[in-house]
Image (cartoon, helix red, strand yellow):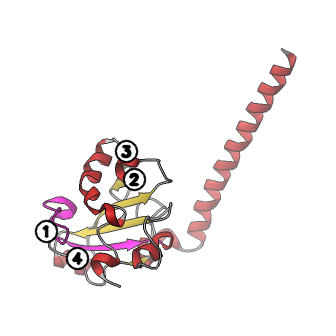
Amino acid sequence: MKNLTKTTKFSWRFLMLALVGVLYLSAFTATQWKKEGNDKKMIGSEEWADYKNWYKVTKEPNTGDPTGFLDKEHRGVKAYRDVFVNSIGEATNKGEAEFPYPEGTIIVLEAFKDKGSWEEQKKPELTIMIKLSIATSPETGDWEFVDGASGKNRGSGTSKLGVFCGSCHINAMATDYNFMNYTTIGK
């Protein structure tokens, strides 16, 4: 019983130390982010806050319904859309690396209601795809879908958002559930 108590105390101490470390690292990262002048660029979650600096997939804004599946999604067929991918997935998107996208890839779709809003860069609707580790969400091709810049509405697998987004993106299974890449846009 005496050894069990020592083990339990050690486990609690280790857990508390780990928690303090995580909190410190989070605070340090946020402080460093602001020191580097990025606080003005923050758009939603830090995961994609600087997406405008990523590789821009769409050379011109995407309009209409190039996929045949949009209907009213992503602001519909009259919307002006731009797509960005982080450096982790850039080579795959460009066709310099094979599908599937590597874990950690983030793709941001920026949708504006019309040409005027796009020209002014006024109030884009963001939808985001995040590539998860293999076999995390087979129902969505191991993608997590995020609706909105805040990152609060997320889903994968059999969640409501996972099913909703995945039911369309499965039509792009050959290109790892992604419609906008070198196979559709060109190099």
Quadrant for the N terminus in the image = top right
- 3D distance between C-alphas at marks 2 and 1: 24 Å
Q: Secondary structure at mark 4?
A: loop
- 3D distance between C-alphas at marks 2 and 3: 8 Å
Q: Could you tell me if the residues under marks 3 and 4 are in contact, i.e. CB atoms within 8 Å?
A: no
Closer to the N terminus: mark 3 or mark 4? 4
Q: Which residues are magenta?
A: 65-86
* Residue 144 tag number: 2
Closer to the N terminus: mark 2 or mark 3? 2
Residue most extreme to the right:
2
Number of labels in the image equals: 4
Task: Measuring from the top left, give residue 10's x and y in whole percent.
Answer: 80, 31
The residue labelled by disc 1 is 77
Which residue shows up at 71% across the image and 37% down it? Answer: 15
Q: Secondary structure at mark 2?
A: strand
- 3D distance between C-alphas at marks 3 and 4: 28 Å
Q: Is residue 177 above or below residue 90?
A: above
Task: Measuring from the top left, give residue 36's x and y in whole percent.
Answer: 58, 74
Crowding at mark 1 (Cα within 10 Å: few <14, some 14-19, many 20+): many
Crowding at mark 3 (Cα within 10 Å: few <14, some 14-19, many 20+): some
Q: Nearer the viewer, mark 2 or mark 3?
A: 3
| Displayed quadrant of residue 160 | top left
* Residue 62 tag number: 4
Which residue shows up at 51% across the image and 72% down it? Answer: 38
